[in-house]
Amino acid sequence: MASNVNTTVDCDVKDLSLAEGGKKRIEWAFQSMPVLQSIRKQFLKTQPLKGVRVAACLHVTTETANLMATLRDGGASVVLCGSNPLSTQDDVAASLVADYGISTHAIKGESNDVYYKHIMSAIDSRPMITMDDGCDLVTILHTQRKEMLADAIGGTEETTTGVIRLKAMANDGVLKYPVIAINDAMTKHFFDNRYGTGQSTIDGILRATNILLAGMNVVVGGYGWCGRGLATRARGMGANVIVTEVDPIKAIEALMDGFRVMTMAEAAQIGDVFVTVTGNKNVIGREHFERMKPGAILSNSGHFNVEIDLETLGKLASSRREVRPYVDEYAMKDGRKIYVLGEGRLINLASAEGHPASVMDMSFANQALSVEYMMANYKNLENKCYPVPDAIDREVARLKLDAMNVKIDKLTPEQEKYLASWSEGT
């Protein structure tokens, strides 16, 4: 453990000697993050986060590293822990400590006990601002570390699952400070969820299995923004895509988009590859395992590893073994074999590198600007979950277009007047 290494930065990472490679990859990612680059330059000048203690529970990737450096350059004191036991990039964690001086607590493949110990380490910093991806840090702060709540004035939440949990906390009256739902920004869920998850999930599946998707029946559980992106990209690789849903509006949208729509019980009989992206639990369970073809491949790109009922699958199987990195074979008692990728955790981060930096550029630009907004406005906010302010959302989009050298039109005064009036007609 790197926590035993003599360093002035409090940390628990796999190996500080990995830092050189991590730094190169962090710099490579930063080239594709022009919006965050511009924010970082501005933060260096204005120091909007001077003296602010930030505890971040995020996937420890190259893109996250650049967000942490941006907050640090804005004056913040930052402590980072991983938001998933399999999503940490160990070389990045090492570089954050050795090259950026950022306290980091994350190790790829860490046990659940270590995972929660790392969250506790982040909370030990007495955060004023929390940055979460899945709401684990916020939940523990509100349940096990209530003594630290006195210093917390606001937070941000990155993903759909976390926003759902936060809104439930607010509805129950237990949320003790305002949180901005980064996931609900148009520039986040349109791009990160659809294009990012769509591509990175396929990337994770292919890296883990080296299968050919063309001609296969790929079952996508859930047709939210992530499901839309995943279904589109799977079809682009030649797969026959089947969508399962519980929402009739999303189901008919999938149907009109040209996908087959059916129940998971029906899909279980014909699917070759299954991917869950619902944010719910037991999307694939006993009745589905019992119907699956030999060789069926199961994976998940929802935040928590609850979408596939692995406990029940383990009971149905006569044995389990790892046949490739991130591929577990469950030998069923009737002779069939079912394969689970990445322990049912986020496959795009378990076996791949997560979203491309150009996508995370917008998501993390929203994060940085929302933290700045929170520090300026927290006194006027209630203890509930807020959307990213529209002005920030549009500014992120504008900066991204500028970086891509794309010009758009502006309304003329006459057009603005027309859109604001009701008197003109045919």
Image (cartoon, rainbow, N blue to C red):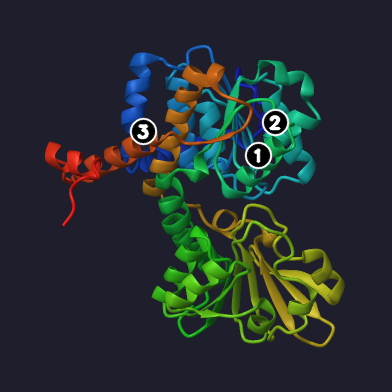
Q: Position of residue 230 (x, y in %)?
A: 48, 66
Query: Could you tell me the amino acid type at mark 1?
Result: Leu
Residue at x-position 18% and y-position 46% = 408
- Is mark 1 in CB contact (under 8 Å) with mark 3? no
- Is mark 1 in CB contact (under 8 Å) with mark 2? yes
Q: Position of residue 140 (x, y in %)?
A: 75, 33
* N-term-proximal mark, 1 vs 2: 1
Q: Which numbered marker is on residue 294?
A: none
| Secondary element type, mark 2 | loop
Q: Which residue is mark 3?
A: 391
Query: Where 412 sits versus 160, above or below?
Result: above
Q: Could you say which quadrant of the image residue 13 lies in?
A: top right
* N-term-proximal mark, 2 vs 3: 2
Query: Could you tell me the amino acid type at mark 3?
Result: Ala
259 vs 335, nearest the viewer: 259
Residue 8 visible at all: yes
* N-term-proximal mark, 1 vs 3: 1
Mark 1 to mark 2: distance in Å?
Answer: 7 Å
Split into 4 quadrants, where in the image is the C terminus? bottom left
Residue at x-position 18% and y-position 39% = 417
